[in-house]
């Protein structure tokens, strides 16, 4: 049996967040999806019963500490030419 892989229009990869990079295919028992950008893949039984065994690594929950530069506050002052009396 030849497996035909098809792109899913408008789908967003849960790992890298890129649109139109997911393709899907199925065999007799399972349905698979893969990202061509980040090599994400998962599968699901045809009846939808499988749950992921662990949380997917995404750009939001990656390990490692992000160092941020100190922020400077912005002070907004009214423009004297536009004040209402």
Image: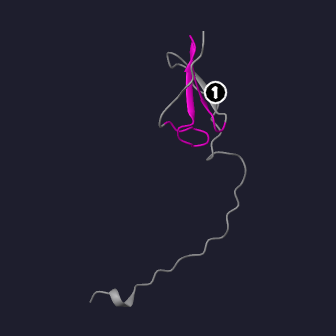
- Front position in the image: 16 or 75: 16
Instruction: Bin the neighbour count of mark 1 within 10 Å (Cα to Cα): few under 14, some 14-19, many 20 and up.
Output: few
Horizontal relation, residue 57 to residue 20: left or right = right
Magenta span contains residue 37 = yes
Element type where label 1 sits in the image: loop
- Front position in the image: 32 or 70: 32
Q: Is residue 29 above or below residue 15?
A: above
- Majority secondary structure of magenta residues: loop
Task: Give the colouring mode of the picture.
Answer: one colour
The magenta segment is: 11-38
Figure quadrant of residue 32: top right
- Front position in the image: 19 or 83: 19
Residue 1 image position (x, y, % from top left): 60, 9
Image point 48% across, 34% down: which residue? Answer: 9
Q: Residue furthest left?
A: 85
Image point 38% across, 90% down: which residue? Answer: 80
Residue annotated with mark 1: 53
């Amino acid at each position: 049996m030849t497996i035909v892989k098809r792109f899913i229009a408008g789908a967003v990869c849960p790992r890298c967040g890129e649109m139109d990079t997911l393709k899907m295919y199925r065999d007799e028992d399972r349905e698979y999806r893969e990202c061509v950008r980040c090599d994400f893949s998962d599968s699901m039984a045809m009846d939808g019963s499988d749950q992921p065994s662990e949380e997917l690594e995404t750009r939001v929950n990656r390990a490692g500490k992000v160092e941020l530069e100190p922020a400077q506050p912005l002070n907004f002052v009214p423009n004297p030419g536009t004040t209402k009396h």
